[in-house]
Image: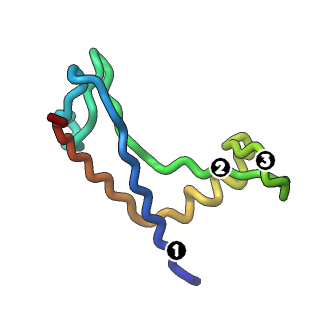
Amino acid sequence: MKRLNVVIHAELEVPDDWELVEHPSGAQVLKIGDEFVDFDIAPLSTRSDDPDAEWSDEDAEIVGKVLDAVIGLDTDLELKFQH
């Protein structure tokens, strides 16, 4: 077996009323109104080698294989205020 490390860095501009909170489960999440929002990986696939191919998570079998291979996942959320 091999190990694949996937590093995803995303930066979002969000409204001032969105906030970071600790969910009762202990996870740090976004709170948008009455909704708690967490981030996870979503594997996308395509069978096309076209540069403009559409990628999706519709192939449940391949998505399941990829998600079954995940042995660890950590999300770090940081809220910075712009001036």
Report x, y in % for residue 58.
72, 40
Q: State the residue at coordinates (21%, 20%).
A: 17
- Specify the amino acid type for callout 3: Asp
- SS of the residue under disc 1: loop
Q: Is residue 8 above or below residue 6?
A: above
Q: Residues within 10 Å of mark 2 (few under 14, many from 20)?
A: some
- Specify the amino acid type for callout 1: Leu
The single residue placed furthest to the front in the displayed view is 83
Q: CA distance from mark 2 to mark 1?
A: 16 Å
Q: State the residue at coordinates (52%, 74%).
A: 4
Q: State the residue at coordinates (55%, 65%).
A: 69
Residue 26, picture quadrant: top left
- SS of the residue under disc 2: loop
Report x, y in % for residue 42.
55, 47
Q: CA distance from mark 3 to mark 2?
A: 14 Å
The single residue placed furthest to the bottom in the displayed view is 1
State the residue position of label 1: 4
State the residue position of label 3: 52
1 and 18: which one is in front? 18
Report x, y in % for residue 30.
27, 33
Q: State the residue at coordinates (60%, 52%).
A: 43
